[in-house]
Image: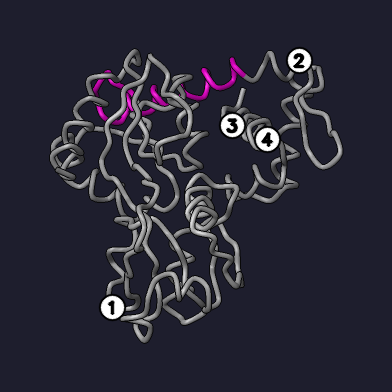
């Protein structure tokens, strides 16, 4: 049985959409659908069913889903063992999108040099989903925004950074009051459905600020890019992800105490690659201390 076909099926179940699974796999929806159909023919049963705009697994699909994930990971581990000569298998690291080009390269730079034989698999997604995957053993470790729920007891946690909220604006607005900018300039809002966006919304409501909203989006890097181009101002966590944009924006502190966004690492304390996870945690602790 082709594990790539199994992976397509797993992605369809995870994202409840053939189109989204295709996007994640860099394939066409037709190709993903064809792979799932081939699996259904091999197993002689339906694996998915459509329900409105979403796709759901059938009862048989649910039974296959968990075993499929195990088979996919076992195949990856075999490939890693064959190519590296070590018995550790593939080390699976998760990262939230804004950290893909910032936190992740900084953390991996020295770690990869010290573990030259290591085979890594990098997955990205929203932090809550990455935390779930670490808890379920699908990932060994992940760089995430601290979730609003309690970390499972089987997982470890290390805070790397604490990020208060700040106003970011084009350089011409330097010297302006933060609340004045939020009230009077076009506002680019962090999506209220995201954890970071909820922190922003809380500050605005606590200080009775109703901004002149122009755009709402769940992407810190896109928000920064829009501010650089003069589209508006924004209220965002003072993140490591925007330290590289000092020439194109000004950061203006808020006059009131702000909610804090915490960036950290969560890892599986009972996983087969716990030694590697702990080594990466200690390396990250030194990098961000």
N-term-proximal mark, 1 vs 4: 4
Q: Give the class, few, some or many, for how many residues have Cα within 10 Å of label 4's Cα (few <14, many ≥20).
A: many
Residue on which the image places disc 4: 12
- Magenta stretch: give its range: 66-89
Which residue is located at x 28 percent, y 20 percent? Answer: 88
SS for callout 3: helix
Would residue 213 appear left or right of 140 to someone viewing this image?
A: right
Camera-nearest label, 2 or 1: 1
Task: Give the spatial CA distance, label 2 vs label 3.
Answer: 16 Å
Residue on which the image places disc 2: 60
The reply to whether discs 3 and 4 touch (Cβ–Cβ < 8 Å) is: no
> Residue 176 at x, y = what percent?
36, 80
Task: Give the spatial CA distance, label 2 vs label 1.
Answer: 55 Å
Residue on which the image places disc 1: 247
Task: Give the spatial CA distance, label 3 vs label 4.
Answer: 9 Å
Quadrant in the picture for the N terminus: top right
Residue on which the image places disc 3: 7
Q: Is residue 196 above or below residue 215?
A: above
SS for callout 1: loop
Nearer to us in this view, 27 or 129 = 129
């Amino acid at each position: 049985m082709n594990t790539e076909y199994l992976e397509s099926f797993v992605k369809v179940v995870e994202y409840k959409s053939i189109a989204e699974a295709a996007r994640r796999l860099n394939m066409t929806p037709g190709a993903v659908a064809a792979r799932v159909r081939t699996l259904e023919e091999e197993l002689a049963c339906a694996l998915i069913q459509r329900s409105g705009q979403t796709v759901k697994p059938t009862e048989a699909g649910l039974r296959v889903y968990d075993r499929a994930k195990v088979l996919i990971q076992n195949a990856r581990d075999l490939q890693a063992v064959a190519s590296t000569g070590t018995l550790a298998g593939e080390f699976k690291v998760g990262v939230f999108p804004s950290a893909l080009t910032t936190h992740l390269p900084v953390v991996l730079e020295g770690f990869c040099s010290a573990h030259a034989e290591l085979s890594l698999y990098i997955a990205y997604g929203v932090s809550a989903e990455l935390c779930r995957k670490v808890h379920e053993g699908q990932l060994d470790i992940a760089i995430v925004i601290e979730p609003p729920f309690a970390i499972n007891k089987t997982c470890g946690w290390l805070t790397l950074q604490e990020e208060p909220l700040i106003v970011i604006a084009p350089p011409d607005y330097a010297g302006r009051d933060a609340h004045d900018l939020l009230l009077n300039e076009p506002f680019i809002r962090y999506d209220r459905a995201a954890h970071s966006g909820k922190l922003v919304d809380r500050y605005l409501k606590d200080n009775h600020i109703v901004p002149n909203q122009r755009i709402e989006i769940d992407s810190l890097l896109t928000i920064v890019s829009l501010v650089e181009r003069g589209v508006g101002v924004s209220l965002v966590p003072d993140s490591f992800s925007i330290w590289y944009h000092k020439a194109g924006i000004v950061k203006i502190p808020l006059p009131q105490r702000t909610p804090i966004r915490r960036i950290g690492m969560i890892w599986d304390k009972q996983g087969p690659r716990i030694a590697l996870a702990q080594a990466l945690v200690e390396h990250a602790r030194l990098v961000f201390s």
